[in-house]
Amino acid sequence: MINRRGLLIILSSPSGAGKSTLARQLMAWDPALSFSVSATTRAPRDGEVDGREYFFLSEDDFKTEVADGRMLEHAHVFGNFYGSPAGPVKKTIEAGKDVLFDVDWQGEIQIRNSDLGKHALSIFILPPSISELHRRLVKRGQDSDDVISKRMLKSWDEISHWGAYDYVLVNDNLQDTEKQLKTIINAERMRREQQPSLQSHVHKLQAEFEEMP
Ligand code: ADP
Ligand code: 5GP
């Protein structure tokens, strides 16, 4: 029997707060972590590769995936569709590996309410200030001024859902946040319901106990 079940680790934040950076650091920390590559109808940014950051789909193809029940969750964000393919997730967590999701608050609710919800761990990343959030979006240099303004306007909408998450971190110093994330994940991996093999271990302890003179 496997030692543990995988967690569905959900990272959300307003755009620019640092969740992709943190997700990359977690993947480098634990190569057994599996990143859930979302599907999206938005255009690829410079350097993004189909199948690595996202599966880039047409709107028609995306809608077919949803209609055929192949998305664990999906949402409309910044005028585009995004969704997490369901297929790989179940297999991965049953094999005892964690899956990392970079999804918005709508995705968090849907994953939590799914059949796999009891294995979900959700973490919300807050920026230290709104002006710093803006600075980070500009520094990232991936979006036009127009797109940055759109993301800033939506940031409060995302932040307002912070209360639905299991943990909330303020990403001020990147190294500190990375450390805090690892602490949370290490602890949550030991949750009782994440360790199905405990049951047989306790049975063995009981048998040994009953055989004691
Ligand atoms: P998100 O995925 O939440 O949209 P990113 O991870 O792309 O955000 O981060 C946005 C920008 O902010 C990037 O240029 C990244 O290097 C930078 N960044 C992330 N975390 C920090 C931090 N703690 N301090 C300073 N800059 C940061
Ligand atoms: P971006 O276009 O910057 O990559 O992502 C925009 C927003 O969409 C981010 O808040 C990100 O978390 C969210 N997002 C990315 N993939 C998914 C997904 O599969 N489902 C949901 N619900 N949101 C997603």
Image (spheres, rainbow, N blue to C red):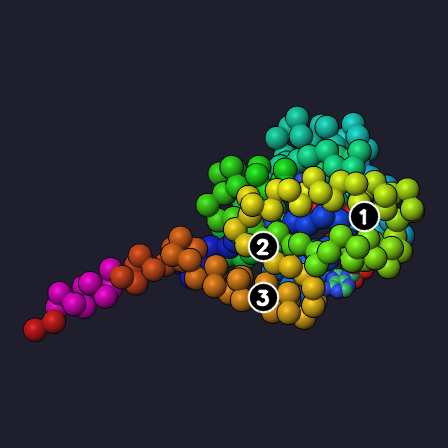
Q: Which residues are magenta?
A: 203-211
Q: Can you identify the residue that label 3 sits on?
A: 180
Q: Is mark 2 within 8 Å of ligand 1?
A: no
Q: Quadrant of the N terminus?
A: bottom left
Q: Residue 90: which quarter of the image?
A: top right
Q: In this rendering, would 168 be left or right of 127?
A: left
The numbered dot on residue 5 is: none
Q: Earlier in the sequence, mark 3 or mark 1?
A: 1
**Which amino acid does the dot numbered 3 rest on?**
Gln
Mark 3: secondary structure? helix
Q: Amino acid at mark 2?
A: Val
Which mark sits nearer the N-terminus, 2 or 1?
1
User: Which label belongs to residue 168?
Assistant: 2
At mark 2, the secondary structure is strand
Image height of 196 relative to 90, above or below: below
Residue drawn at point x = 82 percent, y = 53 percent:
134
Ligand 2, seen in the image, is in the quarter at: top right
Q: Is mark 3 within 8 Å of ligand 1?
A: no
Work out how far the residue at label 3 is from the one at label 1, CA to CA, in angstroms. Answer: 31 Å
Check contact, mark 2 vs mark 1: CB within 8 A. Answer: no
Q: Is residue 133 left or right of residue 175?
A: right
**Which x, y percent locates residue 107?**
63, 40
